[in-house]
Image (spheres, rainbow, N blue to C red):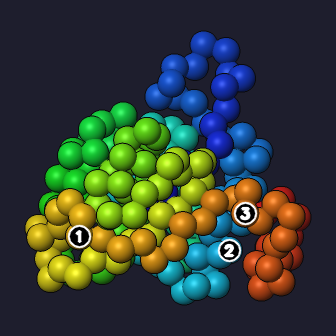
Amino acid sequence: MIHHAKSDWEEPGASDFERGLTDRGYRDINTIGSYLLLRGIVPDIILSSSALRAQESADKLAVKVGFDGPLLYLSELYLTPPETILETVMLQEDDADTIFVIGHNPQLTAFANMLTDEHVSKIPTMGVVAMTFDIGSWQELEERKGEIDFFIFPKQFKYYLPNQIRAVLDRNGPGAQ
């Protein structure tokens, strides 16, 4: 589960659905994407809310991790109950081992807490809760079946940026997106 990057509230007249990302949002995608790239984590499919800020987060993250598979923008992931997110994931093909779900709070945090006995208080913007499941099919996904593999978010890297991530960021140039 991935909470979209920091969104822009400054655009006059823009609806919640139409809000794009801030410069900080793009930087955070670059940082988190570098971490995922170093871990060798590339999804088989990306499911994203159809809201602009989620789409932009999905697009930029896909480029950062070298993803070239199916990227679906779904209205079912925009401000929807966690049960609907669960149903959406359960419909995915079983040849997809790794799925990125990019959405919104508080629904995404509730979804994460639905899937595990561990508790996540809040997934911040561009936060990632990676889970593993002991299932043979996405149709078997249900409450409390997941274990958190890791939980990261941009502010963890505010004062300390591991050399490996810094090297990836440096290769892409300043402000790379």
Which residue is rendered at x = 37% and y = 41% of the image? 107
Disc 2 marks a residue whose amino acid type is: Ser
Q: Where is residue 25 in the image (x, y as percent from the top left)?
A: 69, 48
- Density class for disc 2 (Cα within 10 Å; few <14, some 14-19, many ≥20) is many
Q: Which of 160 and 22 is in front in this view?
A: 160
Q: Which mark is residue 156?
A: 3
Left/right of residue 32 with respect to residue 41 in the rendered view: right
Specify the quadrant of the image occupied by residue 97. bottom left
- Density class for disc 1 (Cα within 10 Å; few <14, some 14-19, many ≥20) is some
Disc 1 marks a residue whose amino acid type is: Lys
Q: Which mark is residue 2?
A: none
- SS at mark 2 in the image: helix
Q: Residue 145 carries which label?
A: 1
Q: In whole angstroms, how far apart are the C-alphas of marks 1 and 2?
A: 28 Å
Quarter of the image with the C terminus is: bottom right
Say which of marks 1 and 2 sits in front.
1
Residue 44 shows in the view:
no
Left/right of residue 50 with respect to residue 139 in the rendered view: right
Q: In this view, does 168 lie above or below 146?
A: below
Which residue is rendered at x = 57% and y = 30% of the image? 19
Disc 2: which residue: 34
Left/right of residue 99 with respect to residue 55 in the rendered view: left
Please report whichever mark, 3 or 1, sits nearer to the chain's N-terminal start: 1
Residue 143 shows in the view:
yes
- SS at mark 1 in the image: loop
Q: In whole angstroms, how far apart are the C-alphas of marks 3 and 1?
A: 27 Å
- SS at mark 3 in the image: helix
Q: In this view, does 63 lie above or below 120?
A: below
Please report whichever mark, 1 or 2, sits nearer to the chain's N-terminal start: 2
